[in-house]
Image (cartoon, helix red, strand yellow):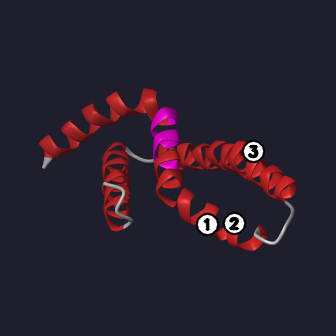
């Protein structure tokens, strides 16, 4: 069992310098999986508006909405990951990427 902890500590030491990038990757991947669904919902809500307003709402959603969401969620994920012990960090990162892969498969993205 000690080998597992040593391996987790070694792997966590490799992951820790890249936790911000890992958090952004996780958030961006989830947003790319569900972005089409979000856009379709917004499109349905604004379909009766003037084309100029629809365009402005789309620009605001894509440029600012997704950008702000990515920044804040990535910071949240980073803070959660940075507080974990080595074995929990490795488990969480691998688990999150597996879950994202399953979600992508279910949404027919891969």
Q: CA distance from mark 2 to mark 1?
A: 5 Å
**Residue 22 percent location from the top left of the image:** 45, 38
Q: Which residue is mark 1?
A: 40
Badge 3: few (under 14), some or many (20 or more) residues near its Cα, within 10 Å? few
Question: Which mark is first along the chain, 2 or 3?
Answer: 2
Q: Which residue is mark 2?
A: 43
- The one nearer the camera, 99 or 105, is 105
The quarter in which the C terminus is drawn is bottom left
Say if mark 2 contacts mark 1, CB within 8 Å.
yes
Above-or-below relation of 47 to 78: below
Image position of 101 (left or right of 60): left
Above-or-below relation of 38 to 75: below
**Residue 25 percent location from the top left of the image:** 47, 41
**Residue 82 percent location from the top left of the image:** 50, 41
Disc marking residue 16: none
Q: Which residue is mark 3?
A: 64
Q: Quadrant of residue 98?
A: bottom left
């Amino acid at each position: 069992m000690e080998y597992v902890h040593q391996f987790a500590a070694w792997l966590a030491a490799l992951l820790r310098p890249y936790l911000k990038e890992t958090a952004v990757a996780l958030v961006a991947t989830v947003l790319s999986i569900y972005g089409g669904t979000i856009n379709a919902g917004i499109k349905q809500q604004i379909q009766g508006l003037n084309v100029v307003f629809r365009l402005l709402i789309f620009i605001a959603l894509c440029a600012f909405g997704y950008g702000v969401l990515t920044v804040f969620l990535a910071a949240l994920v980073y803070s959660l990951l940075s507080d974990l012990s080595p074995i929990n960090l490795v488990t969480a990162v691998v688990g999150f990427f597996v879950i994202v892969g399953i979600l992508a498969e279910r949404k027919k993205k891969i």
